[in-house]
Amino acid sequence: MWSIIQAAGWPIWPLIFASVIALALIFERTWSLRQSVVAPAGMVDRVLADYKQHGLTQEVLAKTAMQGPLGRVLAAGLANVKSPRPVMKEAIEEVGRIVSHELERFLTTLGTIAAMSPLLGLFGTVVGMIEIFGSQSAAGSNPIQLAHGISVALYNTALGLIVAIPSMIFYRHFRAKVDSLVLEMEQQSIKLVELAHGERK
């Protein structure tokens, strides 16, 4: 591994740094965007059961808010359960926008790495080409410098693509996952509003 890094030259270090960040973000988002953590199934029914059993107390609101992003949205609705439907809906939407923004955390960074990695690889390729042309002189070419320039060009191009492709795949996957989770939270929030105002049984 170290021999490859040496052969690729100094332009490979930004790509290695980007790959470490991308890998950390992929693991973090995979862990944080689980359905069971963000929007567990049947949470509305459990929240309403607690509300009917204990009433609208601070303990019930705190317990609901601690149950992840969907819990915070439902707690905002529950806090305004005695208000008219538009007020309750507005409170849910306000918290929902904040929660949605938090679910998208780090995705911009991952998308930037996916877009930037091929450019960093291209930069390494250009550096390698400069070394190749620099090996030419009136006395002839320097084979060691020529070989090093070729390895710098090829290794950086390859690593740029190796970093970019998985980063783009996971970026698209996480974007779709966030959209799906936001839709699920909207549906459960609407269900809470309708059940609280007697519009659904």
Image (cartoon, rainbow, N blue to C red):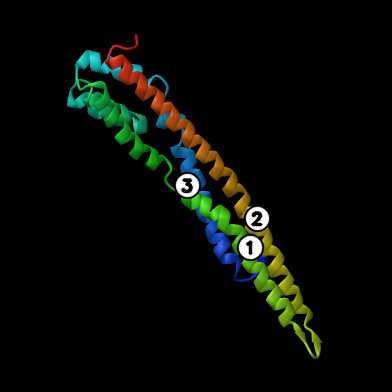
Q: Give residue 93's position: percent from left, percent from top.
A: 32, 32
Residue type (three-letter) at the residue carrying disc 2: Leu
Q: CA distance from mark 1 to mark 2?
A: 7 Å
Q: Are marks 1 and 2 in contact (CB under 8 Å)?
A: yes
- Per the image, label 2 sits on a secondary structure element best described as helix
Occupied quadrant, residue 77 = top left
Whichever of labels 3 and 1 marks the residue nearer the N terminus, that label is: 3
Residue type (three-letter) at the residue carrying disc 1: Gly
Query: To which residue does mark 3 refer?
Result: 107
Q: Residue at x 30, y 30 (%)?
A: 92
Sort mark 1 into few (<14), some (14-19) or many (20+) by Cα contacts within 10 Å: many
Q: Residue furthest right?
A: 140
- Per the image, label 1 sits on a secondary structure element best described as helix
Q: CA distance from mark 2 to mark 3?
A: 19 Å
Whichever of labels 1 and 2 marks the residue nearer the N terminus, that label is: 1
Q: Is residue 84 left or right of residue 129?
A: left
Q: Any mark on residue 161, and which? A: 2
Q: Is residue 136 left or right of residue 5?
A: right
Residue type (three-letter) at the residue carrying disc 3: Leu
- Residue 82 in view: yes
Query: To which residue does mark 1 refer?
Result: 121
Q: Give residue 42's position: percent from left, percent from top.
A: 39, 19
Q: Are marks 3 and 1 in contact (CB under 8 Å)?
A: no
